[in-house]
Amino acid sequence: MSHITDTVTPQHNIIRPPLVSGLPLLGSALPLLRNPHDFVKKAYGEYGNVFRFRAAHQKYIILAGQDANRFVAGEGKDCFTVEGFWGEAFEHMGCPHGVVGVDGEIHKFQRKLMSPHLVQSAFKDKIPDLASPIQDLITRNINKKRIRFGPLSRHMISNQIGYNLQGYKTSHKKVEQMIYLFSSVMNVFGLRKWPKIMLYTPKILLAAAITKKHVERTLKLSEQRSEEDKQTSPQYLDDILPAMKAKPEWFTEGDIGMHALLPFVAALDTVAATMGFMIFRLLNDPALYKRIQTEVDTHFANGVPDLATLRSMQDLNGLVKETMRLQPTGFGITRTAAKDFVFQDHQVYKGESVIIFTTADHTNPDYFPNPEKFDINRNSKERNEFKQPAFAPYGKGAHNCIGASLADIMMPLNMGLIVHQLTITAACDLNKVNVIFNPAPVLSNNFKVSFSSRSSS
């Protein structure tokens, strides 16, 4: 363990966080690039709840564990801002007040508008509508021998949310282009992995043009809706557009356009990547696959189950939650210190980059016995381990995932539909499939499967 500290106020024993040891010049860049989740997890085990690391020219402070989660959501909520991490990215995309990249009243205003459309209760009687786009893509991919599951799952989720919030589906090509644009901008401005010149390469400029055209079409379709349409089949933008246009002092046309795009790209990191990890688990564990299939067949036998039935499926929901515990797609949140503050006797200065490792205790044996074991029985009524505050796959604080409750019904629904209707087999060497970060963790592109219909087998 490094013993490097910078004394700030000796009389109060306030010191700088310990610095993770690393290579000259590079610091911790290499292990961070290989697997940032494993890097911060290992450092947390060695250095504790607060530490620093350096990766080439970038410097970060990590706050971890339950005290950090409580701090960012409670007494320390004013110590952080998202604008340092997201600001340049959203300025580049022409939406300086995008909901993810702004704090304060503008952020609260947008979340208040969005929340009614993203809570589980909004879909209580619309589970078949959520299922429809998934069933459509399942049908189209039956008997295909080598399917890249990552792009397919992203297309599923994009169509599922886009159709249910905006009233139409989009193509696989557009989904991939929109995702590529977002990840590229974050690699430049958020993670600082790429130089800015990358944003002007033909590939990214094409993705930006396709995204822009998609936004324009979505806005046009929304503005053409009649009052009768809005009453009989309300959509997301019916509420968002007039409310945002009524506050021109807050929102630019780009900010409004971002909301036209969000339903087609939101939740892709969390839901689509987690679906990939779940399929990978099932293919590697035939007994687990059979157990999930048995429960799913019971509850999906008469068609798409209702919300209460989905919630009651102990094994399927255990699969979802245990996957998110051990392979969280949002394992931490990146912020900038909005002011000088002290956390557990360690000084943090205004302007420093801070990562709150919200899922640090997902593998803490104090909360999850035998923590490295994949065990869906943690979801049993007797154990109920996922009800603990230590389980935090959707972040903490003012910017926690606004679609978390919707994701909690989409994932068991989607996995249930796939497992019930299809026989899934690996179309690749599973031993050669890796976790990559782009920028969130996903399975590598060589993860391929084949589907066949169970009804015809």
Image: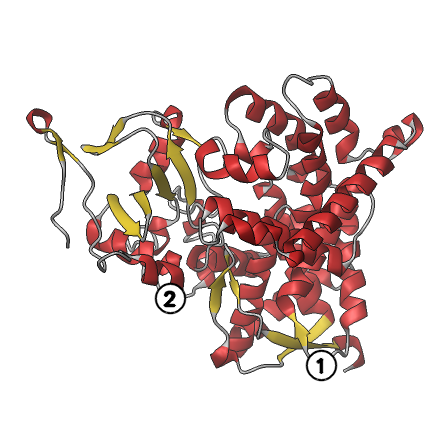
Position of 202 with respect to 2 (left or right) is: right
Q: Residue at x 51, y 77 (%)?
A: 284
Please tell me which residue is depicted at 39% across the width and 30% down the height of the picture.
Answer: 80
Question: Would you identify the image quadrant in which residue 227 lies?
Answer: top right
Give left or right: position of 40 versus 391: left
Mark in the foreground, 2 or 1? 1
- Counting from the top left corner in percent of width and height, residue 130 is at 74, 50
Element marked by disc 1? loop
Residue 324's tag is: none
Q: At 73% from the left edge and 48% from the top edge, which residue is drawn?
A: 209
Tell me: 401 left or right of 172: left
How far across and down, in percent of the image, does residue 265 sit? 66, 48
Tell me which numbered mark, 2 or 1, is placed earlier along the sequence.
Answer: 1
Image quarter of the N terminus: bottom left
The amino acid beneath tag 1 is Lys
Q: Is residue 11 left or right of residue 292?
A: left
Kind of residue indicated by mark 2 = Lys
Residue in front for this viewpoint, 83 or 119:
83
Task: Residue 440: tell me if it is visible.
Answer: yes
Q: Is residue 213 above or below residue 425?
A: above
* Residue 145's disc number: 1
The quadrant of the image that shows the C terminus is: bottom right
Residue denoted by label 2: 373
Is residue 285 in view from this perspective? no
Find the distance from the CA under tag 2 to the CA under tag 1.
Answer: 32 Å
Q: Position of residue 88 (x, y in %)?
A: 52, 37
Hey, which residue is sitting farthest left in the picture? 11
Percent across and percent down for residue 45 are 24, 54
Q: Is residue 194 above or below residue 346?
A: below
Per the image, label 2 sits on a secondary structure element best described as loop
- Total labels: the figure holds 2
Q: How is the image coloured?
A: secondary structure
